[in-house]
Image (cartoon, rainbow, N blue to C red):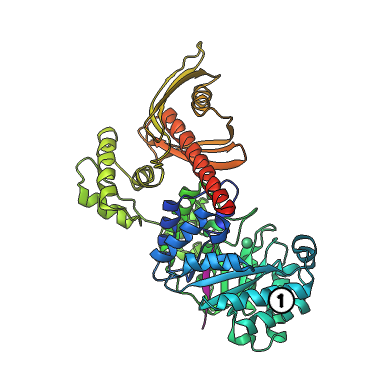
Amino acid sequence: MRNIKFFDTTLRDGEQSAGVNLNLQEKLEIARQLERLRVDIIEAGFPASSKGDFEAVKQIAETVRTCSVTGLSRSVRSDIDAAWEALKGGAEPRLHLFIATSPIHMVHKLRMTPEQVIEAAVEAVKYAKRFFPIVQWSAEDACRSELPFLAKIVAEVIKAGASVINIPDTVGYITPKEYGEIFLYLQNNVQNIENFSLSAHCHDDLGMAVVNSLSAIEHGATQVECTINGIGERAGNAALEEIAVALHIRKDYYQVETRLNLQEIKRTSNLVSKLTGVVVPPNKAVVGKNAFAHESGIHQDGVLKEKTTYEIISPELVGVPSNSMVLGKHSGRHALRNRVEELGYTLSDEEINQLFVRFKELADKKKDITDDDLIALIFEEKFDHFKDFYQLSSIQVQYGTNQIPTAVVVLKDGKGNEIQEAATGSGSVEALYNTLERCFQTEVTLLDYRIESVGGGRDALAQVFVKVRVRDVETSGRGTAQDVLEASAKAYINAMNRVFMIEAMRAENEKVATS
Ligand SMILES: [Zn+2]
């Protein structure tokens, strides 16, 4: 059986989703989880694009030991140099070079002739090969390129030293049959191509990313690029979990193997959804909440008698836990640590100690602490902490049906200074957010506000997600508390801290660029 490599680009293409801005801690956690999932390659970012991206790629390359870590690079030396600096500490450094090959991109974006594009591509691959053992080359907008030209440039970059050739459907335009034909064309028209790896990279603008990727595999591709939950630019990328499970369940048809640990799929999906704030639709294949729920009476009856009557994927295959374990007031630090590890999170001793304090506080107010509660606490402790930025000290909100809702907020900035403000609004949340806007002294557009309970029960934790726009930065934030208003305040502050983090990074980049 052929082996198919999974190239995960959740941290690069996925992070390009509108409103997704992960901090370093969050990226590292996702990278560690991708390693547990046993993807072959992790694309950790675009090192030359910003100082923050550079740092994240470097740390991921140095942390991950059992996957190859790669970074994106334009076909220019300064990008390749930055990528090498970021990736050289990795277990198997690999560069992902790209240049556009479609007439529309070459004419309007690059303003280069096809000959100039070939020259630039070859030059870049040769330069990259001085440092990198593995160079992957991508033809941006390959699917709208002229096939003879595509074959010509692929032949040239192979000669120059590229060992993986990626054929992205950058704009999500191709159909499965056409996509398969491009792979066949290259196999028939590029000499020695059988000694190199062909890779698929699909976008979901027409809802065909997964099926196009599968078609590429059927027609000779040995690598697929995808993201967890299919997040990514515009309508997203091909969903890793859907391709992986399709290849497994229909092994009889596809006749290929992967090295993935499918049992980590659900955990990875949850982690990415929670950290990015991008919700998984309940009806989504493989990882949706309802993916294994049988509703009709006839179906339920059938499944009870024999599972396979209506169930082609077992929940256990992708690691959906059958019973969620519950911790309580009397659970000790050891039980807590065990559970955290079973849930797939990596916490330092100090973080465990802090988490234990929070856990005990919650256990005093809430009888059963479920996995979801625990994950919410881990998030507060590990990821939502912006030490150098703003923190909530206290809130007070007054509401009555015949009163004007009023809020008072006290915040602490990174230097420990207190900021206190008060304001009114037509509802409690508006009063609170008007007050916070005053605290930050800047105009904040609230693009989305969502509230949900963590699990069931009247004493459940409240979790709030917000999306905000401040100046030209769009980002999301989340907050958890037993009270909905406190959770709302925390989510808003979390989003604002991300805004300041992004702006600080940009200012840092400008300093680098001008010095
Ligand atoms: Zn893409």
* Rendered image quadrant of residue 66: bottom left
Between 290 and 187, the one lying in front of the other is 187
Residue at (35%, 55%) from the top-left corner? 345
Q: Name above or below for residue 166 compared with residue 204.
A: below
Q: Give left or right: position of 93 versus 514.
A: left
* Rendered image quadrant of residue 197: bottom right
How many discs mark residues in the rendered view? 1
**Secondary structure predominantly adopted by residues drawn in magenta:** strand
In the orientation shown, which residue stands out farthest toward the bottom? 192
Between 165 and 403, the one lying in front of the other is 165
- Residue 46 at least partly seen: no
Q: Is mark 1 within 8 Å of ligand 1?
A: no
**Dot 1 alpha-carbon crowd within 10 angstroms: few under 14, some 14 to 19, many 20 or more:** some
Dot 1 lies on which element? helix
Between 38 and 50, the one lying in front of the other is 50
Q: Give left or right: position of 19 versus 489.
A: right
Give the residue number, with chain letter if any, for mark 1.
Answer: 119
Task: Estimate the x, y position of residue 140 in percent, counting from the top left.
Answer: 68, 67
In the orientation shown, which residue stands out farthest toward the front? 515
Residue at (53%, 66%) from the top-left corner? 83
Quadrant for ligand 1 reads bottom right
Residue at (53%, 56%) from the top-left corner? 229
Residue 501 forms part of the magenta stretch: no
Residue 7 forms part of the magenta stretch: yes
Q: Specify the amino acid type for callout 1.
A: Glu
Q: Name above or below for residue 10 compared with residue 449.
A: below
Q: What span is in magenta?
A: 1-9
Task: Estimate the x, y position of residue 40 in percent, counting from the top left.
Answer: 47, 71
Task: Estimate the x, y position of residue 289 in percent, counting from the top left.
Answer: 49, 51
